[in-house]
Image: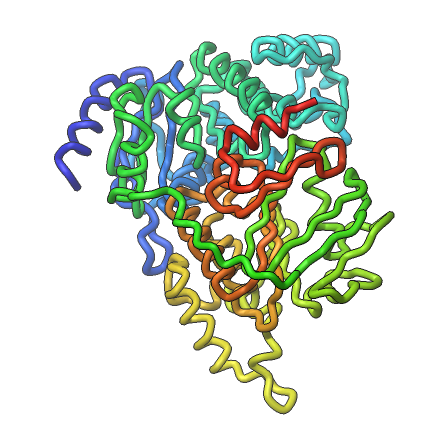
């Protein structure tokens, strides 16, 4: 470990009175060391950023705090001035006032705000009856402090995404009957939010810290780390390599260097021009869901961007193309041939690949192995005389694991669910790259929720696809990503394509998205 990193940690440790402190915590899974002698001080009343590549150990650390994983012997947990035994259990973590907000929020949409915030910990009277009015007052006061004015009996399904995130924060702060949690861990809470919704969430985070809670913020969006945190800890390969006040960071590149352990010369790979003249995919007047009258032409080897503000229809276009969403109007043509009676099976047979935005729900089979996921659409290539050649299949997958730098390496039978988000995305991209006869691949928010290293790696392989003559339809909400990767960008508003931009800047894309 470098001397500067040690000095940074010492500076933070000197301020650690009034904090949740983990000291010398390690965790081993089989022969894999997920955490190595991790020490971190999370001060009450501060927002602490925890960053690192996918697989760096962040989720393992959170699960130890939540009582889901037991650490290796030898670590210590100190809350304030009191030492507590490890391992924790979910019950003992809740009793300490530890609350957690995960990326999917874990809310029951059909229930009220109060039901979600206070589940299992309602205020009761002498005979065990719930004191509904008092409970509602507690919840509404807590929401108001977090910047949301809503009745406690409002169904969650009526809330915006930002309001739902605040409800999840309120549940974490309530902490099984405590009105002030000691620790609140937020794991990728902004992944699915617009810029405006994100700003509302930051107000709630700052309010939670002002209540005296130690807030831990985990995100791959490093600009957010610089904007909202007071201190930052960087994990790399299971070790703390830097811990400092946010103001001590020179800039975003300084933080990237700490995360990767090297200089990232260019965040986005160079954009070669592989666009050909042959049409790979054409949409004519396509309508369904929130999309209406969408027409576009995508050529072989071209990267075509599709974007718009939330609700503009761009998110429904991929599902219409592959037949997951019912088409009301229009038609889809692949290499000039109409795709009739569209269905996912027919789309794959026609040469269309699709990487959905929600990889856990729509893209991969979490319980299945890396091998099974990676060969899901190309298994026929390993079949001879009606039998699967498992040796050839495993050899192909082992080679892909090495080529795509999927970590931990070498285990083809590890469940997809056991991998970090960035490594899951690598597996799912590798699945489509192994498919023969691929004409077009639709990538829907392909870098959402992945770290900077994995993001560049994924985008480099997008360039490899175009070099093979595969057309790429990139549906993204990130203007800079679109500007760096796309030959053209189509902007949707009100369910239809309203503008076409040739090699635009991120600013030009943003301006077109918000035009009336």
- State whether residue 341 is above or below residue 487: below
Q: Is residue 464 visible?
A: yes
- Total marks in image: 0
Q: Is residue 199 left or right of residue 64?
A: right
Q: Return the x and y of residue 396 as percentages of the image width and height.
A: 46, 75
Residue in view at x 56 percent, y 55 percent: 302
Q: Quadrant of residue 39?
A: top left
- State whether residue 100 is above or below residue 337: above
Q: Is residue 171 left or right of residue 137?
A: left
Residue in view at x 43 percent, y 50 percent: 271
Q: Quadrant of residue 31?
A: bottom left
Q: Return the x and y of residue 62 as percentages of the image width and height.
A: 43, 37
Quarter of the image where the N terminus is located: top left
Out of 98 and 346, give the one closest to the viewer.
Answer: 346
Q: Return the x and y of residue 152 as percentages of the image width and height.
A: 72, 15
Q: Residue furthest right?
A: 328
Q: Is residue 70 visible?
A: no
Q: Return the x and y of residue 79 as percentages of the image width and height.
A: 35, 23
Residue in view at x 74 percent, y 47 percent: 295
- State whether residue 134 is above or below residue 116: above
């Amino acid at each position: 470990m470098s001397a500067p990193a040690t000095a940074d940690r010492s500076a933070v440790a000197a301020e650690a009175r009034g904090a949740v402190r983990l000291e010398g915590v390690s965790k081993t899974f089989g022969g894999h060391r997920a955490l190595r002698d991790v020490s971190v001080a999370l001060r009450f009343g501060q927002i602490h950023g925890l960053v690192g590549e996918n697989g760096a150990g962040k989720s393992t650390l959170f699960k130890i705090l939540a009582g889901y994983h037991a650490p290796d012997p030898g670590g210590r947990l100190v809350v304030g001035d009191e030492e507590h035994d490890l391992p924790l259990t979910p019950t003992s973590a809740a009793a300490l006032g530890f609350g957690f907000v995960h990326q999917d929020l874990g809310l029951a949409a059909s229930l009220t705000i109060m039901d979600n915030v206070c589940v299992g910990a309602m205020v009761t009277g002498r005979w065990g009856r719930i004191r509904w009015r008092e409970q509602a007052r507690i919840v509404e006061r807590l929401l108001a402090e977090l910047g949301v004015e809503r009745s406690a009996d409002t169904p969650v399904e009526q809330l915006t995404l930002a309001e739902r995130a605040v409800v999840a924060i309120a549940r974490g702060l309530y902490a099984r009957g405590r009105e002030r949690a000691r620790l609140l861990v937020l794991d990728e809470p902004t992944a699915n939010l617009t810029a405006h919704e994100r700003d509302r969430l930051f107000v709630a985070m700052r309010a939670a810290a002002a209540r005296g809670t130690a807030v831990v913020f985990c995100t791959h969006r490093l600009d957010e780390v610089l904007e909202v945190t007071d201190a930052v800890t960087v994990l790399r390969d299971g070790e703390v390599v830097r811990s400092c006040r946010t103001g001590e960071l020179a800039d975003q590149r300084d933080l990237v260097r700490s995360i990767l352990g090297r200089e990232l010369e260019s965040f986005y790979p160079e954009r070669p021009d592989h666009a050909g003249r042959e049409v790979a995919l054409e949409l004519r007047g396509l309508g369904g869901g929130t999309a209406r009258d969408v027409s576009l032409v995508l050529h072989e080897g071209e990267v075509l961007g599709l974007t718009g503000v939330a609700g503009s229809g761009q998110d429904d276009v991929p599902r219409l193309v592959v037949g997951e969403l019912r088409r009301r109007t229009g038609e889809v043509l692949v290499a000039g041939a109409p795709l009739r009676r569209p269905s996912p099976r027919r789309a794959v047979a026609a040469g269309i690949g699709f990487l959905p935005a929600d990889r856990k729900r729509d893209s991969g089979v979490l319980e299945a192995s890396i091998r099974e996921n990676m060969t899901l659409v190309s298994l026929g290539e390993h079949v001879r005389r009606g039998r699967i050649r498992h040796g050839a299949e495993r050899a192909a997958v082992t080679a892909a694991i090495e080529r795509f730098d999927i970590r931990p390496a070498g285990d083809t039978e590890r469940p997809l669910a056991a991998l970090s988000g960035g490594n899951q995305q690598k597996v799912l991209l590798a699945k489509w790259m192994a498919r023969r006869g691929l004409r077009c691949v639709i990538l829907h928010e392909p870098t959402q929720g992945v770290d900077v290293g994995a993001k560049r790696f994924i985008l480099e392989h997008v360039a490899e696809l175009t070099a093979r003559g595969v057309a790429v339809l990139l549906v993204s909400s990130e203007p800079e990503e679109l500007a760096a990767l796309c030959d053209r960008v189509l902007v949707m508003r009100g369910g239809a394509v309203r503008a076409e931009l040739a090699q635009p800047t991120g600013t030009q894309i943003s301006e077109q998205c918000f035009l009336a």
